Image (spheres, rainbow, N blue to C red):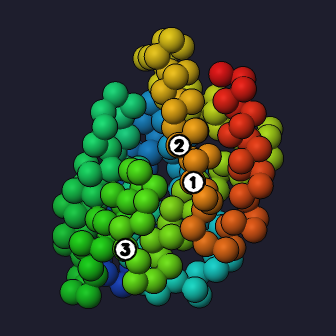
Amino acid sequence: MKHWLKNYWQDLISDYADISLIDSLWTTIESQYTSKNRHYHNLSHIYNMFLQLEDFKTEIEDLDSLRLAIWYHDIIYKSTTKDNEEQSALFAEKALKDLKHDSFNFESIKNLIISTKKHELILTKNLDNAYLLDLDLSILGTDWETYNMYTQNIRKEYIIYPDILYKPGRKKVLKHFLERDSLYFTERFQTKFETQARSNLILEIEML
């Protein structure tokens, strides 16, 4: 997986940077996503998003910007802070400033990243933002065994909090998603994941 991701990164950036910058950026990405506090928000999460993206990448208007947003949307992740997405967006802006490409819309990339904070659309001119959010939450609609493993990994990331604090907070998040008309923004993901996702969330709430 890591070899695949490194090649994927090199293919994405090769037109915009020399090999030393490509390798430097990759080293930082790898280091961030493999830190010891990462149990779900790690390279496997990024890998799964890219694998799914391959199925409909021709539908994306600004594919490179979306790919960069995926790479950097969880680059900063600390369970004890509430500004991970904003910090990730700033991190991406600083990291990518030396790319040799004037047409990158860095505000768009930053907004895509920040939209993952509340999982609400910021950019609506096309479906790129919608697909990013749906990819990020696709785990919710997987089979129960996979979903249950995801919940265990999330709990590990919040291990600093005792159950008396974690469980009410987790329930609040899950109930917020269930109150939406749909968990997903695109018809593709609604068809594939919506029913199973709602079932998973309801079952997790019952188990908390």
Which image quadrant for residue 203?
A: top right
At a point 75% along the width and 68% down the height, the residue shown is: 191
At a point 31% along the width and 66% down the height, the residue shown is: 111
Identify which residue, 90 or 168, lies in the foreground: 168
Image-based side of 25 in relation to 129, left or right: left
Label 2: which residue? 176
Q: Amino acid at mark 1?
A: Arg
Identify which residue, 21 or 81, lies in the foreground: 81
* Quadrant holding the C terminus: top right
User: Are the two marked residues, 1 and 2, in contact with CB atoms closer than 8 angstroms?
Assistant: yes
Label 3: which residue? 123
Q: Is residue 87 above or below residue 58?
A: above
Q: Amino acid at mark 3?
A: Leu
Label 1: which residue? 180
Q: Is residue 71 visible?
A: no
The local crowd at label 1, few if under 14, some if 14 to 19, many if 20 or more residues have their Cα within 10 Å, is: few
At a point 44% along the width and 45% down the height, the residue shown is: 33
How far across and how far down the image is residue 195, in percent? Answer: 77, 55
Q: Is residue 65 visible?
A: yes
Q: Amino acid at mark 2?
A: His
* Quadrant holding the N terminus: bottom right
Q: Which element is circle 3 on?
A: loop
How far across and how far down the image is residue 126, in percent? Answer: 45, 83
How far across and how far down the image is residue 160, in percent? Answer: 43, 17
